[in-house]
Amino acid sequence: MSKKSKKIEEVLAEEGAAAENYEIPGAMPENVKVSRPNLGRPTVVSVRLSADEYARLQRAAEQANLPVSTLIRIWTLDRVRVEAEGGAGSLAQRLARLERAVFQRST
């Protein structure tokens, strides 16, 4: 292993250890909200969107005062619930309805 590689690995190890040992200060400014919302959700799902689709989702999320990922999660889980309850219509009809709901909220 070269000196440069060893240095990088050492720096990464030190930074990792520092992050693991970091403690949130007891007193935070009033405008700062500390949360760890994803502790119970360790799985990440990636979805590819066009720039326009993402912009529309961002607008919808801003209108709902939510992060984009939270909005996507809410809509997705709601749709899974509807399906589990025997959502009506063909797959094509349900997808069309979902698409309308997603993009009407963002315009």
Image (cartoon, rainbow, N blue to C red):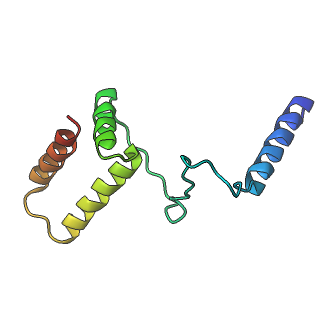
Q: Which one is nearer the viewer's eye here, 14 or 93?
A: 14
Which quadrant, please, contains the C terminus? top left
Task: Point out the image quarter for the N terminus.
Answer: top right
- Which quadrant of the figure has residue 26? bottom right
At a point 64% along the width and 51% down the height, the residue shown is 28
Q: Residue furthest bottom?
A: 85
Query: 79 or 90: which is nearer to us?
Result: 79
Would you say 3 lies left or right of 48 here?
right
Who's the residue at 32% across and 56% down the image? 74
Relative to 5, does residue 38 appear above or below in the rendering? below
Q: Would you place residue 8 above or below residue 39 in this image?
A: above
Outermost residue, front side: 30
Residue 36 x, y percent position in the rendering? 56, 58
Measured as percent of width and height from the top left, residue 3 is found at 92, 31
Looking at the image, residue 105 lies above or below residue 89 = above
- The reply, left or right, for residue 71 in relation to residue 7 is left
Number of numbered discs on residues: 0
Q: Residue furthest right?
A: 3
At a point 30% along the width and 46% down the height, the residue shown is: 64
Q: Estimate the x, y position of residue 39 in percent, counting from the top left.
A: 55, 63
Q: Is residue 46 above or below residue 54?
A: below
- Name the one closer to the observer, 23 or 93: 23
